[in-house]
Image (cartoon, rainbow, N blue to C red):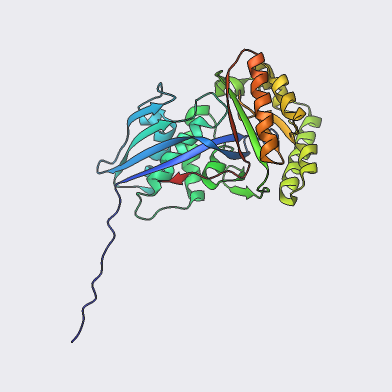
């Protein structure tokens, strides 16, 4: 007797969720191009596929509530609009955001919403894209928040680990698993646009040369697993001197990190959060306490995160 083979199709999901974690943008020496994620805080996006060919934001909750509900004015909404237009999708998305990262914190809050929304929406496509292919749409979303297309936060959120992000390419940099980051966020808001305005003006060519050398040393140290090279190079001579005056107690917080064995310490993203890199978790934990104490001396309570430098990418579910 002839048997008929039955075929079954898996029904396409109409809803997906994703979380993107906090990040250290710039890593001191890689302005707008280098960053890594720090587990422990993140933004979550719930995305529903809808028949209408539009993007709409249903609600926003969490640590930040005063955000645009108009999709075009929201980083996550703008990213999904860019995705829809580029792929000429016949359907749309409804988005709910759960904010776990404060804006103006220097921890990639706008980028996290953007990446979480894209990663979730990607699960609803008939033919999902690679993480790298989502990058241009993430840049479009980030531009809404900061006024510029920079990927230092987006790259690591999409790929995980330490990532070098150019205008059209993401390169993951190997980092020893035992290296840890201490990230301390004072309860003080520093708007990204204000922090970027502080960078206006001319720079000495010699400082560009020194910064390039420092970036090269850090990247070489990561590839070779040599902390001594990172210690020599993890020093920002371009951006930090101009932004440090915007952060109360910065010099003391940085010194606390260095006193506790940091390979280097600087401003996370646009600030006011401060990070340090350490060769092990114990040193990072002890340093984070000292850094928080220094912020307290400056009059600000703070939150601490200690996690591997080789942090996780955005995850679905």
Q: Residue 125, percent across and down?
A: 36, 51
Looking at the image, which residue sits at the far left? 1
Q: Is residue 270 visible?
A: no
6 vs 69, left or right, is left
Q: Residue 59, percent across and down?
A: 33, 29
Looking at the image, which residue sits at the far bottom? 1
The residue lying at 60 percent from left, 45 percent from top is 161
Q: Nearer the viewer, residue 80 or 270?
A: 270
The residue lying at 21 percent from left, 78 percent from top is 4
Q: How many marks?
A: 0
Indicate the quadrant containing the N terminus: top left, top right, bottom left or bottom right. bottom left
47 vs 173, left or right, is left
From what the image shows, is residue 199 above or below residue 225? above
Q: Nearer the viewer, residue 28 or 37?
A: 37
Q: Residue 69, percent across and down?
A: 35, 27
* Quadrant in the rendering for residue 230: top right
From what the image shows, is residue 2 above or below residue 310? below
* Quadrant in the rendering for residue 51: top left
68 vs 36, left or right, is left
The residue lying at 29 percent from left, 54 percent from top is 12
Q: Is residue 91 visible?
A: yes
Q: Nearer the viewer, residue 208 or 42?
A: 42
* Quadrant in the rendering for residue 279: top right
Q: Residue 2, percent across and down?
A: 20, 85
The residue lying at 43 percent from left, 45 percent from top is 119
């Amino acid at each position: 007797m002839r048997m008929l083979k039955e075929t079954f199709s898996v029904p396409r999901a109409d809803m997906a969720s994703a979380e993107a974690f906090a990040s250290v943008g710039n890593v001191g020496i890689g302005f707008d191009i280098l960053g890594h994620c720090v587990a422990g805080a993140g933004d979550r996006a719930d995305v529903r596929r809808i028949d209408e060919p539009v993007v709409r934001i249903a609600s926003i909750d969490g640590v930040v509530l005063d955000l645009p509900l108009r999709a075009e004015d929201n980083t996550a909404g703008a990213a999904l609009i860019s995705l829809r237009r580029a792929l000429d999708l016949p359907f749309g998305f409804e988005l709910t955001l759960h904010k776990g990262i404060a804006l103006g914190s220097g921890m990639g809050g706008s980028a996290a919403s953007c990446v979480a929304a894209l990663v979730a929406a990607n699960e609803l496509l008939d033919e999902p894209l690679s993480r790298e292919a989502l990058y241009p749409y993430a840049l479009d979303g980030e531009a809404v928040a900061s006024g510029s297309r920079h990927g230092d936060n987006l790259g690591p959120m999409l790929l995980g680990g330490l990532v070098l992000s150019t205008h059209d390419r993401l390169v993951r940099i190997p980092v020893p698993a035992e290296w840890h980051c201490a990230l301390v966020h004072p309860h003080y808001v520093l708007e990204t646009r204000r922090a970027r305005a502080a960078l206006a003006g001319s720079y000495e060519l010699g400082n560009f040369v020194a910064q390039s050398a420092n970036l090269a040393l850090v990247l070489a140290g990561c590839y070779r697993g040599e902390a001594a090279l990172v210690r020599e190079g993890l020093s920002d001579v371009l951006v930090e001197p101009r932004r440090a005056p915007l952060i109360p107690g910065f010099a003391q917080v940085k010194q606390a990190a260095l006193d506790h064995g940091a390979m280097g310490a600087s401003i996370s993203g646009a600030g006011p959060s401060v990070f340090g890199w350490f060769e092990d978790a114990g040193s990072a934990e002890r340093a984070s306490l000292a850094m928080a104490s220094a912020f307290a001396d400056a009059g600000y309570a703070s939150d601490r995160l200690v996690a591997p430098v080789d942090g996780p990418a955005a995850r679905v579910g």
